[in-house]
Image (cartoon, helix red, strand yellow):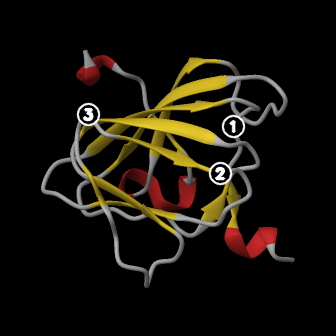
Amino acid sequence: MPEKVEWSAMIPAMGKKGPAMAVVFGKPGVLGQPFGGLFRVPAGGESPSHIHNSDYWAVMLSGTESARQGAKDAPARIPPGSWWFQPGKAQHVNKCMGPEDCVFFVYYKDGMDYVPAESHTK
């Protein structure tokens, strides 16, 4: 039941307006080991530009998400039941495009981390 999932803010400074995560398996921040988690982006919410060091595959469960390289790029709609691949170390932005929260499952083959784009380029 999604309402019973315990969500943790991925970006504490954004609070409930930012993306949240719930661990399914693995440990966030530990690279070199598989990680699976549920992720939620609030309706209309957008992540800052960021990277993950591992490739990932995601499956959209509810809401309509977009994943694009930069905030100014045209978003491609990812409706429920769709999946997408995000290469590791590729800068991207996620946005929830509809009136409901976006929830998706993500599998990182080499561990999950979150690196703000400005930190990655320094």
- Label 2 belongs to which residue? 87
- Callout 1 amino acid: Met
Residue 24: x percent and y percent? 53, 18
How far is the residue under mark 3 from the one under mark 2?
A: 20 Å
The answer for how far apart the CA atoms under marks 1 and 3 are is: 22 Å
Q: Is residue 27 above or below residue 62?
A: above
* Classed neighbour count for the residue bearing mark 1: other residues with Cα under 10 Å, few (<14), some (14–19), many (≥20): many
Residue named by callout 3: 81
Q: Earlier in the sequence, mark 3 or mark 2?
A: 3
- The residue positioned 70% from the left and 29% from the top of the image is 109
Numbered label attached to residue 112: 1
How far apart in space, not on screen, are marks 2 and 1 (Cα)? 13 Å
Q: Compare residues 18 and 71 and report the one nearer the observer.
A: 71
Judged left or right of residue 45, residue 64 is left
Instruction: Give the residue drawn at x 53%, y 45%.
Output: 85
- Give the x, y percent position of residue 6: 42, 24
**Residue type highlighted by circle 3:** Gly
Asked if residue 36 lies left or right of residue 28, the reply is left
Judged from the image, the secondary structure of the residue bearing numbered disc 3 is: loop
Side (left or right) of 84 relative to 119: left
* Label 3: few (<14), some (14–19) or many (≥20) C-alpha neighbours in 10 Å: few
Task: Answer above or below: position of 49 versus 52.
Answer: below
